[in-house]
Image (spheres, helix red, strand yellow):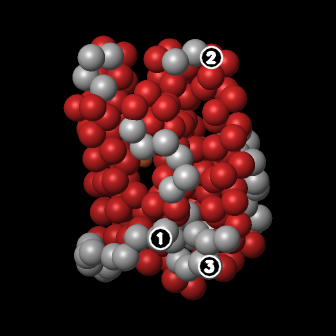
């Protein structure tokens, strides 16, 4: 799905379900991080009008998602609080270019892959969670994350080239799959 180089088994949902409040809290943080990353890129790539338009809209959507997840936490009586993030995003960025033009390409494509993985996992949640309300909640969210993947991939292709974006995405997808395959099994969206 969505250019990912590995597939999460449905058993992931069974594994995280006992700690689902922790996963929801992580999910809330992920949405806020997604918004913050998009805003950071609007600052960094402000000379590209396509980036400014696409990512300011995307950031707003991620903040909407954040507020929706907050409402779910509230309904479950789970206070929003700080939480240690999984190593996923940090390890994903390790071994990729951080600066210069290569850094811009890798940043956009890492964002694309994070969106793709979120979408894949939300799809599993929408299919296999034991709670019907949560299943439909994730069913509604996953379409946006699929679109966000396309936004980031499209920006990479537009600023660089279709070929450059495609080749680099394939390489980074292998790296992303490796990061997840060696991640600690903890109750997080990307673990
Ligand atoms: Fe989101
Ligand atoms: Fe997203």
With respect to residue 96, does 180 lie above or below? Answer: below
Determine the residue positioned at 52% across, 61% down.
91
Residue 164: where, in percent of width, then height? Answer: 62, 22
Front residue (pair 184, 91): 91
At x 63% / y 44%, what residue is drawn? 172
Viewer-proximal residue among 143 and 136: 143
Q: For this rendering, which residue is in front, 98 or 10?
A: 98
- Label 1 crowd bin: few (<14), some (14–19), many (20+), radius 10 Å: some
Task: Check disc 2 and report the residue beneath it.
Answer: 162
Specify the label residue 86 is tagged with. Answer: 1
Mark closest to the chain's N terminus, 3 or 1 = 1
Alpha carbon separation for disc pair 3 and 2: 35 Å
Residue situated furthest front in the rendering: 100
On the image, which quarter does residue 39 sit in? top left
Q: Is residue 93 above or below residue 98?
A: below
Visible in this render: residue 184? yes
Left or right: residue 39 versus residue 130 is left
The residue to which callout 3 is attached is 185
Rendered residue at 30%/63% (across/down) = 70
């Amino acid at each position: 799905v969505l250019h990912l180089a590995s597939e999460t088994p449905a058993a992931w949902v069974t594994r995280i379900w006992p700690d689902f409040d922790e996963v929801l809290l992580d999910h809330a943080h992920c949405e806020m991080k997604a918004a913050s990353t998009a805003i950071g890129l609007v600052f960094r790539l402000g000379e590209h009008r396509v980036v400014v338009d696409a990512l300011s809209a995307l950031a707003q959507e991620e903040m909407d998602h954040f507020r929706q997840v907050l409402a779910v936490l509230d309904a479950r009586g789970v206070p929003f609080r700080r939480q240690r993030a999984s190593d996923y995003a940090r390890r994903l960025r390790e071994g990729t270019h951080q600066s210069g033009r290569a850094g811009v390409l890798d940043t956009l494509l890492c964002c694309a892959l994070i969106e793709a993985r979120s979408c894949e996992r939300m799809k599993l949640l929408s299919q296999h969670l034991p709670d019907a309300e949560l299943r439909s909640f994730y069913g509604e969210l996953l379409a946006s994350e699929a679109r966000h993947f396309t936004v980031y991939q499209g920006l990479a292709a537009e600023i660089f080239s279709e070929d450059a974006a495609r080749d680099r995405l394939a390489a980074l997808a292998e790296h992303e799959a490796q990061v997840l395959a060696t991640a600690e099994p903890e109750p997080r969206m990307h673990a």
